[in-house]
Image: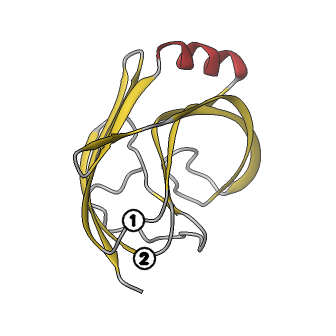
């Protein structure tokens, strides 16, 4: 989320899905290379809080993602219990630990992209909070 240019986009990625980050309420332009054959997942807008926080957040949450000029669909995830493992200095909690929280947001899941260059625009907002990320994605052939 604090990655301004995409230079950290491969950090700690699992093998079965490639996560793209939003921001902490700012705009960003990122360039990211990823392997062929891995599906993508990313939030349009999301938060961690209480069930009540999530209800208020989701009441006004909206967003869109545009991949290579075409809008893609998103899924609303209401207050769901999530497990978080965090590292020291992370931009959300700042500390290392493992804890359970309530998460919510608008999320997109995409099948693996074809090899080559792609553009992805992510926009989301809820209340006074807004996110915008423009990605240039290069999918490397296997």
Where residue 86 appears, as percent x and y from the top left, is: 64, 56
Badge 1 local density, few (<14 within 10 Å), some, or many (20+)?
A: some
**Residue at left offset 54%, top offset 13%:** 59
Where residue 18 appears, as percent x and y from the top left, is: 50, 64
Where residue 89 appears, as percent x and y from the top left, is: 52, 57
Q: Is residue 34 left or right of residue 42?
A: left
**Residue at left offset 38%, top offset 52%:** 2
Q: CA distance from mark 1 to mark 2?
A: 7 Å
Towards the viewer: 99 or 109: 109
Badge 2 local density, few (<14 within 10 Å), some, or many (20+)?
A: some
Towards the viewer: 85 or 134: 134
> Which residue is tagged 1?
113
Q: Which mark is residue 83?
A: none
Q: Answer yes or no: do the residues labelled 1 and 2 have beta carbons within 8 Å? A: yes
Secondary structure under the numbered disc 1 in the rendered image: loop
Q: Give the colouring mode of the picture.
A: secondary structure
Q: Is residue 107 above or below residue 19?
A: above
Q: Is residue 6 left or right of residue 91?
A: left
Towards the viewer: 1 or 75: 75
**Residue at left offset 58%, top offset 45%:** 93
Q: Is residue 8 left or right of residue 43?
A: left
Q: Is residue 103 left or right of residue 1?
A: right
Secondary structure under the numbered disc 2 in the rendered image: loop
First in residue order: circle 1 vs circle 2: 2
Q: Quadrant of the C terminus?
A: bottom left
In which quadrant of the rendered view does residue 124 lie? top left
Where residue 34 appears, as percent x and y from the top left, is: 39, 73
Q: Is residue 21 above or below residue 124?
A: below
Q: Which mark is residue 36?
A: 2
**Residue at left offset 35%, top offset 28%:** 130
Q: Is residue 51 above or below residue 77?
A: above
């Amino acid at each position: 989320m604090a990655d301004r240019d995409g230079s950290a986009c491969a950090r700690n990625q699992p093998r079965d899905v490639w996560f793209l980050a939003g921001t902490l309420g700012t705009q960003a332009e990122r360039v990211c290379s990823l392997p062929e054959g891995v599906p993508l997942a990313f939030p349009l807008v999301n938060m961690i809080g209480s069930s009540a926080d999530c209800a208020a957040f989701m009441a006004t949450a909206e967003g869109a993602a545009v991949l290579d000029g075409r809008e893609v669909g998103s899924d609303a995830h209401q207050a769901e219990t999530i497990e978080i493992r965090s590292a020291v200095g992370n931009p959300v909690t700042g500390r290392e630990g493992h804890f359970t929280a309530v998460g919510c947001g608008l999320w997109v899941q995409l099948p693996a992209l074809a090899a080559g260059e792609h553009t992805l625009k992510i926009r989301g907002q809820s209340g006074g909070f807004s996110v915008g990320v423009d990605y240039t994605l290069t999918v490397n052939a296997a």
